[in-house]
Image (cartoon, rainbow, N blue to C red):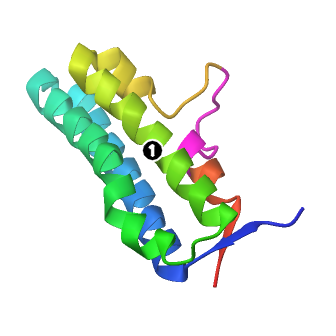
Amino acid sequence: MTKAVIPAQALELARKAAARVRELEAKADEALHGRGDTAGHRGLMIEKCETLADLPEAVEQLASEADTPAAEEFLSGLADFARRAGQAMDLGSIFYMTALLYPEDYVAGEKNDLERFLDGFDAV
């Protein structure tokens, strides 16, 4: 399978955001299950959603420089993740915020939806 090619800086920035999301999720899990800190957990889940919501704007200029169908697909996919993150924050649903990137049949240790989406792209 041939991967869509986008500017390296755009893909790297998106991958860093995906890693940040994982980091926030780990901290949120520790806050909730390790310390019983529901407020801390909520704050970290909001930060996760904000990271996702800000991602399209953060990479837009870098990706749009390519002006290719792959760049459009990349930005469109990131915009969908951002839209869902915004919905989760608008609803104030911690469950939705937590489950945002994970299908029902997710198995711990697998890649989440954002990571799988980014795997569909290569950098130039």
Q: Where is residue 70 in the image (x, y as percent from the top left)?
A: 67, 63
Q: Residue at x 9, y 25 (%)?
A: 39
**Image: 16 above or below 55:** below
Residue 114 placement (x, y as % from top left): 54, 47
- In-front residue for pair 30/24: 24
The part of the image, by quadrant, that contains residue 68 is: bottom right
- Judged left or right of residue 89, residue 111 is right
Which quarter of the figure has residue 34? Answer: top left
Residue matched to label 1? 79
Task: Point out the stretch of residues depicted in magenta.
Answer: 105-114
Q: Is residue 66 above or below residue 84?
A: below
Q: Residue at x 49, y 70 (%)?
A: 63
Instruction: Identify the secondary structure beneath mark 1.
Output: helix
Magenta region, mostly helix, strand or loop? loop
The number of callouts visible is 1
User: Looking at the picture, how far across and down is residue 44, in whole percent?
Assistant: 20, 38
Q: Is residue 108 magenta?
A: yes
Pick the front one: 29 or 42: 42
For the N terminus, give its image quadrant.
bottom right
Q: Which residue is drawn at 38% across and 59% down?
A: 17
Residue sitting nearer the eye, 62 or 100: 62
The reply to whether residue 99 is visible in this rendering is yes
